[in-house]
Structure formats: C-alpha cells, structure tokens
Image (tube, grey):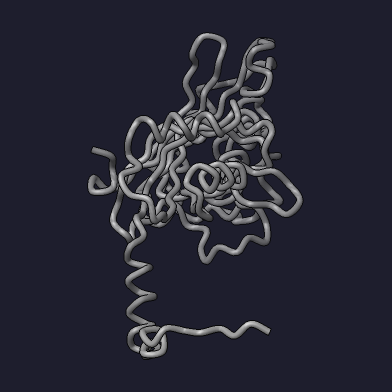
C-alpha cells in the first residue's frame, strides 16, 4: 500500500480556534450583498407567488432562474403572497448573493432570457443588508378589472360582468371603508396573521371605456381581502345590498356575512411604496 508523505509545512498548520471559526462565519455572511428586484407576472399559470407543495409558483421559477444565472443557491423573499391566478404589474422581492454589481442592464437581459414569457424581470438594485421587501413596504395598491362587454383578449385578465351596476352606490360603499380598520369580514378564515387591522388610503371605482376598475391602497392587506371587498361591492352595485348593509358587514367582523370573492383573474398588484432610501437611484 502506498504511503502518504506530508510536507513539514502541512504538519505545522494549527487548527482553527473557536473564535477564528466564528469570525470566518460572520465574515462570510457579511460578504453577501442584498438586492431588491422589481418584476411583473401574469398569474394565470401559477399557484400564486409563494412556494406551494406539488405546485408551480412564481417564486419557484424565479429562484431557479436566479440560481442558474448566478451559479449559487438563491432564496427569494417577496413583498407578499398572491393567490392562484392573480397578476402583478409591479412586484418587489429581495435576495442575498455573493455576486457584486448586479444592477446593470446585461444581468436584467440574462434573467429575462431564462424566465418564461409570463414573468418579466424589470429592475435590480443594491440595498442595505437589513432591507426587507415585505416588512419595509409602506403601502400596496391593487386594481380589480371588470370587463363590461365580452373581450376575448381580456378573458384571463378581467372579470366579465355585463349585468347593470350602480357604480355610484358602489363608490359610496367604498368610501365607508375609510371609517374602519378591522377587516375580519373580508379575510380568509384560519390565517396565521396577528391582526386583521389595515389602514385604507384609497378605494374608488372608475370607468374606462369598456372596463370598470376598482383601485384600493392600504398599508397592508389580508389574504383574499381585495377579492372579498370587490365581491361584496358588486352586491351593492346589483342592488342586493345597501350602503348601510355594507357597513353592517364590515362591523360584523364575520367572513360568512360578506359576499362571494370575485374571481382571481381580474386582480392585479399594481404598486408598492417604500421609503426613499430603498428606491432605485
């Protein structure tokens, strides 16, 4: 059997001390660079943003593409979760990487080459190591699109509803949202959030050609909240609920008394506001 002979210099190497090991670990950790990324996606083919068992999500596809391009394992944290079939014109996520200076056009180009046609990589910029795409968000804006006439090109991105609607009554009911902070009546049951309180900044219906668009902005949203609000406001528009009935539903703090959730495919996340220090230059 051959004999291994080590040089004298090898035998003189001292083992790492515990302090040196800890220093190495933290130095390695501090070497990571945190990035914010802006993207948009058409949610038709995805089970929402967040990783789901035995299902394809936007997060899974994005992490795979980033890991392939950067040749390291990348985990992405999104600004929030979206339901199956919901779209995003504006979505923000963050990740850490050993790679530096990724905020350049050729990296955006490479990412879009790896991503499918229904996910677009828009921007990337470096942020400080504690920045968080979800917890640092100041507000989020959603828009719900209703098509008032059949449009084959909007079949996957707008809810077709052709019956008469009292839009003025729907807007009066939407104004009532500003008087409340607890939106338990519009929250999915059995969620793991600590509070159902949200602050509404904007809630309005507007007509644009053949579309009826509901825009709502708040500091945070509960799961299924926007779709539940839209579904209930449609009941007001159809004359089945009054504005006072709508208030009673909010005050009941009971999901079972609110209307059916509007279909997912009409909903878009359209904006997320952050402190100026976290916005791209």
Query: Which of the image's four quarters has the C terminus?
Result: top left
| For residue 276, side relative to residue 8 (left or right) | left
Viewer-proximal residue, 248 or 206? Answer: 206
Front position in the image: 93 or 35: 35
Q: Position of residue 26 (x, y in %)?
A: 35, 74
Residue 276 percent location from the top left of the image = 23, 45
The residue depicted at 65 percent of the width and 55 percent of the height is 254
Q: Which residue is drawn at 37% across and 51% down?
A: 99
Q: From this viewpoint, is residue 248 visible?
A: no
The image quadrant that residue 242 belongs to is: top right
x then y, percent, for residue 35? 37, 49
Kindly identify the residue that appears in the image at 68 percent across and 18 percent down: 155
Q: Which of 104 and 49 is in front in this view?
A: 104
Give 183 or 114, whichever is nearer the viewer: 114
Indicate the quadrant where residue 152 lies: top right
Quarter of the image holding residue 14? Answer: bottom left
2, above or below 46, in the image: below
């Amino acid at each position: 059997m051959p004999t291994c002979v080590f040089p004298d210099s090898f035998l003189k190497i001292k083992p790492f001390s515990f302090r040196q090991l800890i220093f190495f670990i933290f130095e390695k950790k501090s070497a990571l660079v945190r990035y914010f990324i802006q993207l948009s996606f058409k949610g038709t083919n995805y089970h929402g943003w967040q990783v789901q068992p035995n299902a394809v999500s936007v997060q899974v596809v994005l992490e795979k593409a980033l890991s392939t391009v950067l040749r390291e394992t990348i985990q992405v944290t999104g600004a929030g979760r979206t339901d199956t079939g919901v779209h995003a014109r504006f979505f923000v996520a963050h990740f850490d990487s050993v790679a530096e200076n990724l905020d350049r056009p050729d990296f955006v180009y490479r990412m879009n080459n790896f991503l499918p046609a229904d996910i677009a990589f828009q921007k990337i910029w470096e942020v400080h190591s504690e920045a968080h795409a979800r917890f640092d968000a100041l507000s989020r804006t959603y828009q719900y699109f209703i098509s008032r006439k059949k449009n084959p090109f909007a079949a996957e991105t707008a809810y077709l509803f052709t019956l008469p609607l009292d839009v003025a009554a729907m807007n009066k009911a939407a104004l009532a949202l500003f008087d409340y902070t607890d939106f338990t009546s519009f929250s999915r049951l059995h969620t793991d959030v600590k509070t159902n309180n949200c602050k509404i900044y904007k809630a309005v219906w507007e007509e644009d050609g053949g579309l009826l668009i509901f825009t709502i902005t708040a500091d945070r949203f509960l799961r299924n909240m926007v779709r539940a609000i839209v579904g209930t406001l449609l009941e007001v528009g159809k004359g089945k609920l009054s504005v006072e009935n709508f208030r009673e539903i909010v005050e009941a703090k009971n999901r079972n008394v609110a209307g059916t959730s509007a279909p997912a495919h009409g909903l878009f996340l359209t904006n997320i506001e952050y402190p100026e220090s976290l916005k791209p230059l």
